Amino acid sequence: MLPPGCELDFGGIAKGMAVDAALGLLARRGVAAALVSAGGDLSVRGLPAGLPAWPVLVGDDPAGQVVRLVRGALATSGVRRRSWLQGGARRHHLVDPTTGEPAENDLREVSVAAESCKTAEVAATASFVLGSRLGSDFLSRHRLVGRLTYRDETQSTVGAWPSLLPDAA
């Protein structure tokens, strides 16, 4: 039950599902190579003409890491772009379901690679909400690779990141 006036936004989960559906439609229409992105959550099919992989910027830093994605999906959940001040307190859109408040932890963003965009997006958001320790455990348990970026801009990785997605030249 939600209090009157509250709404649920399934935008993040819906974005991953929409990307997967669009890529499936393109495949059924005979498109051999495509990259579909919805607000940074993306998935690829085939390879771009003349390139061995799709160069993809990870996260929200324009000068950040670029990886080469050969297959699958990449999604990032973070708070840099969607945050605001409310009553003097910094707020953001990633809500901890145990409190109903924005998740409070040591993370700025989490990026996850997976076979589907739906899986990558859900795992990135869940890992962010869980925080670095539990989020890393979650990714490991589900055999997913990820990159956690902390508020102080340091990073840690889970699984074979970035060896699954080698740095682009």
Image (spheres, grey):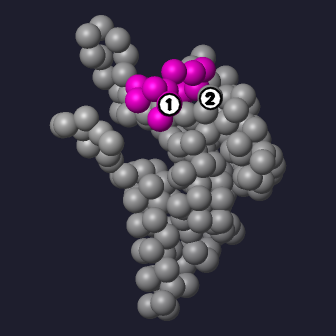
Please indicate whether residue 153 sits to the left or right of residue 167 in the image: left
Which part of the image, by quadrant, shows the N terminus? top left
Element class at badge 1? loop
Please indicate whether residue 140 sits to the left or right of residue 152 in the image: right
- Camera-nearest residue between 16 and 50: 16
Evaluate whether residue 114 shows in this view. Answer: yes
Which of labels 1 and 2 is toward the front? 1
Counting other residues with Cα less than 10 Å from the Cα at mark 2, is it few (<14), some (14-19), or many (20 or more)? many
Of helix, strand and loop, which mostly describes the magenta segment? loop
Residue under the image location 40 percent in, 59 percent down: 14
Evaluate whether residue 53 shows in this view. Answer: no
Q: Quadrant of residue 50?
A: bottom right
Q: Mark 1 is on which residue type?
A: Thr
Element class at badge 2? loop
Residue under the image location 47 percent in, 60 percent down: 16
Question: Magenta residues?
Answer: 97-108
* Residue 115 picture location, percent across and down: 65, 65
* Residue 41 picture location, percent across and down: 48, 54
Q: Mark 2 is on which residue type?
A: Gly
- 42, above or below 77, in the image: below
Residue hosting label 2 = 131
Q: Quadrant of residue 136?
A: top right
Residue under the image location 61 percent in, 77 percent down: 46
Specify the label residue 98 is tagged with: 1
Q: Earlier in the sequence, mark 1 or mark 2?
A: 1
Residue under the image location 54 percent in, 78 percent down: 33
Determine the residue located farthest toward the left in the rendered image: 5
